[in-house]
Amino acid sequence: MNGVAIAVGSAVVVVGAIAISAAVRSGGSAAENEAVALDQRMTAPEAVNGGAERSEDRPQPLTRGPSMAELAQQAASESDNDANEPQERAGRRGDRRGRGGDNAWNREIDPDDLDAQLEAQLRRAERMQRWMLDRFDTDGDGVLNEEELARMQEFQERRMNQMRDRLEQAWGGEIPLTNEEMMAYAGVIGRQMGEARREMMQDFLRDQGVSSFRDLSPEQRRQMGPVMRDAMQNMQQDFINQYDSSGDGRLSAADRERAANDIRDQISTMQNLRLIDLNRDGNISPAEIQHYLDRFNRGDPTADLNGDGVVDVRDLQIFNEVISAN
């Protein structure tokens, strides 16, 4: 169940990341909504859960999927809030999403508390599972029956097709990646897009002489849409240029295969790095090195870097490669 939930959640993230340019293109309101959400995340940790319950947070009829703008915001939220994961849920749980009770979302994890950082990563997987149940467990019994599972798989396939169609349009041809690889690439895209949006927002605010989106005038907010759209288009073009061996602005089959191989390397590096660089600061500290070695010596499943279900010397070899490359 966890694996399926994570896969579907990742697929949603991928679609959202790819849909950013479409969301911005659709008009000022989508861009402003994205900016408001990002501004709130930069200035108020409690905004990670959206404050008051939003309509997309509640279980929706299965005939309605999230809009592209909603998916874009969901992708940014997962990436931007990784470092602010709560140390523990509220003492009084509230509903299945963790709302209600104490506001645990306001608590930031001590970056030196590596056990808490690891627990936060595991909790993200649990959130994915709760999201799955909230959306597809229509009879509310806490498990997915055959009919509910079929609906979930239909949802996953629909989102995956959307993602593949958009990538193939951008790449100019068939994408030589499996669905599983594309879903795993979600984390890479989500983090890159989240970082890019934060930088764009900060640059725009600085150019306008303000410190918060709330301080922008209506005219300044309208100006921000084209700025973000152009920046996202430039990012996409930079990717094409990186692999366009002929210089014609399109990726050949060989170009796409080379890009796919690099993506596989990025996926592997990112997944392993996440299990070592627990505070997500991009640097592996001596404490994080020792923390992984302690888990390895205990045979802890979180030390299984190659995902073969066994903690052995091959994981230690991967660990050494990650450390050397960092």
Image (spheres, grey):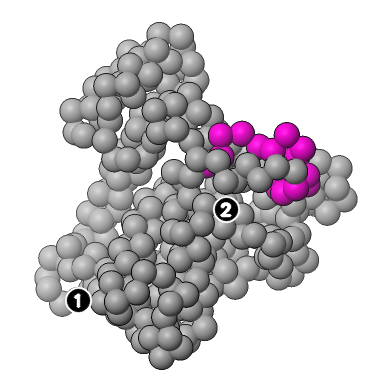
Mark 1 near mark 2, Cβ–Cβ under 8 Å?
no
Residue extent of the magenta highlight: 85-100
- Residue pointed to by mark 1: 249
- Residue pointed to by mark 2: 46
| Residue 279 horizontal/vertical position (percent) | 39, 35
Q: Amino acid at mark 1?
A: Gly
Q: Is residue 52 left or right of residue 125?
A: right
Q: CA separation, marks 1 and 2?
A: 43 Å
Secondary structure category for the residue under label 1:
loop
Q: Is residue 264 left or right of residue 155?
A: left
Q: In the rendered structure, which disc, 1 or 2, sits on the residue that comes first in sequence?
A: 2
Q: Is residue 78 left or right of residue 296?
A: right
In the image, 64 versus 178, the foreground residue is 64
Residue found at x 69% / y 62%? 52
In the image, 200 versus 40, the foreground residue is 40
Instruction: Please rate how many residues cluster around mark 1, counting C-alpha atoms within 10 Å: few if below 14, some from 14 to 19, many from 20.
Output: some
Tell whether position 180 is magenta.
no
Residue found at x 50% / y 40%? 108
Secondary structure category for the residue under label 2:
helix
Does residue 9 sit above or below 270 in this rendering?
A: below
Image quadrant for the C terminus? top left
Residue found at x 30% / y 45%? 266
Q: Name the dominant secondary structure of the magenta segment.
A: loop
| Residue 126 horizontal/vertical position (percent) | 63, 38
